[in-house]
Image: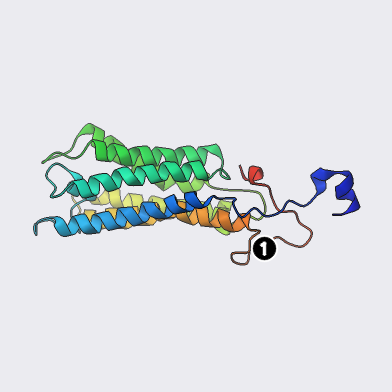
Amino acid sequence: MTQAARQDPARAPIQPDPDFVPGWALISAALAPLLATSAWLVAGALQPAAYSPMRQTISVMAGLAGTDRWVMTWALFAVGLAEFITAAGLTALRPPARVVLLVAGVASIGIASFPEPASGSTPFHIAFTALGGAAVAIWPAFTVVRAWPRPPLLSPLGAATATAVFLILLTWLIIETQGGSQLGLAERVTSSVECCWPLVVALSLRCAGRGGRCGGNRVPAGQQMASPGSYR
């Protein structure tokens, strides 16, 4: 430690924290896309031959007319819970980012709690579906961090790019709801990409907590490592 640091502890370099993002948050972030994808693959295989994953939504498999609807229903509950846990662990992000992720979790649980009827839909199901779609689409915009080392994906440019991609996917999905023939495909692509993003954010922050040693974003010589609180 330098003489200046001994005299002023606030000037001492801050050491990287390998637990910047706890392991349990990484696990929950990884479980969400794994559970979602596995569930719609398994549930899809259980549906009658008339079911088309290209044209019909995931909600149909969890709906009252779905075969073995419990598979998709419990997966939606589990994904919502995983997003709650991930939001609790991403303390390096500002509170609005964590709140939006919590909203996405609430929406997933709401979709499962208010399934589609045998025909048509319900106001609650539509509301939670719209809420979840909007929340996950705009979530990257809230994940910008300004402290060093800043993961490139969590820079203003990285967050803006991810948000733009998600909004394009959401627009495609909305267009397909208007009588499109690829609604099921649009929903699966959109949900798969967006569901993975919390894991990408968690891994990026974990790398930053290790001093950027995960891939080239190292702390320059003479520059201090940011404390976890400075990311918020």
Numbered marks: total: 1
The amino acid pointed to by label 1 is Arg
- Quadrant of image for the C terminus: top right
Look at 17% across and 60% down and name the residue there. Answer: 45
Residue 140 position within the rendered picture, expressed as x and y whole percent measured from the top left: 48, 49
Residue 183 position within the rendered picture, expressed as x and y whole percent measured from the top left: 23, 53
The outermost residue toward the bottom is 216
Q: Is residue 180 left or right of residue 22?
A: left
Query: Quadrant of residue 222 in the image?
Result: bottom right
> 10 Å neighbourhood of mark 1: few (<14), some, or many (≥20)?
some
Task: Write down the residue under mark 1.
Answer: 218
Residue 170 position within the rendered picture, expressed as x and y whole percent measured from the top left: 34, 50
Compared with 146, 110 (above or below) is above
Q: Is residue 33 left or right of residue 44?
A: right
Q: Is residue 101 left or right of residue 129?
A: right
Residue 200 position within the rendered picture, expressed as x and y whole percent measured from the top left: 48, 56
Q: How is the image coloured?
A: rainbow
Visible residue check, residue 232: yes
Look at 53% across and 47% down and name the residue there. Answer: 143
Look at 39% across and 50% down and name the residue there. Answer: 167
Q: Nearer the viewer, residue 58 or 81?
A: 81
Visible residue check, residue 52: no
Q: Secondary structure at mark 1?
A: loop
Compared with 128, 62 (above or below) is below
The outermost residue toward the top is 123
- Quadrant of image for the N terminus: bottom right
